[in-house]
Image: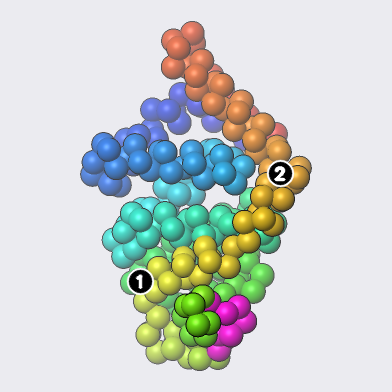
Amino acid sequence: QSYDVSNFQIAQRPQFEFLTGDSQLAQAQIDFVNQMTDQFSLDLNDANKQFTKMLASGKKKLGIEGSQDLFKGFTQISTMLGLSGEEQKRAIMALGQMASKGQIYAEEVRQQFAEAVPGGVQMFADALFGKKDAEGNFIKGSGDEAKFLDEMSKGNVKSEDLLEVAKYFNQIADPKLIKEIVDNSPAKAMNRLKTSYMRFLMAVNSSGATKLMTYRDWE
């Protein structure tokens, strides 16, 4: 799979300006994507595509900050679980559908998200119907899946509830485990190499040394 780095550079800012309606907010989204890419050793191109889709789907119900929180939280969960690139894409697509429809449906949680993310239904149950300790922290495994599924079937689980899911993802994330995975995973090392090469080509393009550079995934 190949794509033109020049097109990436040309399209990234206008896409975010269109989604946010503001040039400064657009730059903030570019900075966010770069931060996530560096912190979790993501593939820059994939991270940009996935966050753009999530922001487009979630900006109305979740807002920009909520969309960022959901993306960051899911990125941490996917890192801990060692999800493949394809599994991440499927889960992001499911979250985007949940965010855009106003109501969360069982098909999106059980047949899309949970098929890509082990324990996905329990995560939603914990976030929305689980218990919290004295300090207000989520207790993993405390959510009633049956109640969650029942409330969802009644139409009582809304897109805005993803904000609570985002809090859950971010809270249960284990920074030490994530750092260990990021530092030692061959897949993460490959992402760093691909992103570094892409940024090199972008810098060459920006310098005016060439008008067209092509980046190729090693897959």
Residue 122, compared with residue 29, is above or below; it is below
> What x and y, as percent, mark residue 47?
52, 44
Residue 130 visible: no
- The quarter of the picture where residue 218 lies is top right
Depth check, mark 1 against mark 2: the one in front is: 2
Towards the viewer: 96 or 173: 173
> What x and y, as percent, mark residue 145?
56, 86
Residue appearing at x 50%, y 22% in the figure:
202
Residue type, numbered disc 1: Glu
Residue appearing at x 56%, y 55% in the figure:
75
Residue type, numbered disc 2: Asp
- The quarter of the picture where residue 62 lies is bottom left
Q: Which residue range is magenta in the image?
A: 138-145
Residue appearing at x 42%, y 47% in the figure:
52
Q: Classify mark 2: residues with Cα within 10 Å, few (<14), some (14-19) or many (20+).
A: few
The quarter of the picture where the N terminus appears is top right
> What x and y, as percent, mark residue 58?
36, 60
Q: Main secondary structure of the magenta part?
A: loop
Q: Secondary structure at mark 1?
A: helix
The residue tagged 1 is 160
The residue tagged 2 is 183
Residue 12 visible: yes
The quarter of the picture where the C terminus appears is top right
- The quarter of the picture where residue 8 lies is top left
Numbered circles on residues, count: 2
> What x and y, as percent, mark residue 174?
63, 61
